[in-house]
Amino acid sequence: MEPDVRERFERLETNLSTLVGVVTTLADVAKSHEERLHEMAKRMDTLAVSQVETQEELGALIRMMDEWIRNNPRNGKSAG
């Protein structure tokens, strides 16, 4: 091989090796992000269920307080 061709080949080999390293790193980062997004989605599902439960409990409390106020002899007003 001619020296110029050999140098070009070695640079190409080095650049290809660098490119493979970069692609491998990107694949690892993508996998990590995918795992984190999956975990976040699971947490969001849990939060959504919890929010529904909280809304139901708050609705029950509001209905209970409304009923209590309606049935209070003073109709929710202070004695005076």
Image (spheres, rainbow, N blue to C red):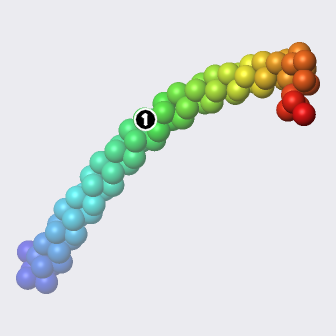
Mark 1 element type: helix
At x 87% / y 19%, what residue is drawn?
72
Viewer-side residue, 49 vs 28? 49
Q: Position of residue 1 (x, y in %)?
A: 8, 75
Could you say which quadrant of the image residue 38 lies in? Answer: top left
Residue at image coords 38%, 38%: 35
5 in relation to 71, above or below: below
Q: Amino acid at mark 1?
A: Glu
Q: Is residue 2 left or right of residue 36?
A: left
Which residue appears at 79% of the width and 23% of the height? 65
Residue 52 seen: no
Q: Is residue 45 left or right of residue 64?
A: left
Determine crowd level at label 1: few under 14, some 14-19, many 20+ residues with C-alpha closer than 10 A.
few
| Rendered location of residue 59, percent (x, y) | 76, 24
User: Which is more toward the observer, 43 or 53?
Assistant: 53
**In the image, is residue 54 above or below residue 34?**
above
The residue lying furthest to the bottom in this view is 4
Percent across and percent down for residue 28 are: 30, 48
Give the residue displayed 58% in from the left and 26% down from the top: 50
Q: How many marks?
A: 1
* Res 11 → quadrant: bottom left
Quarter of the C terminus within the rendering: top right
Q: Residue furthest front?
A: 80
Residue 1 or residue 31, whichever sits in front: 31
According to the image, label 1 marks what residue? 39
Query: Left of 25 or right of it: where is 36?
Result: right
The answer to whether residue 76 shows anywhere in this view is yes
Residue 29 coordinates in the image, percent (x, y): 33, 51
Position of 76 compared to 21: left or right? Answer: right
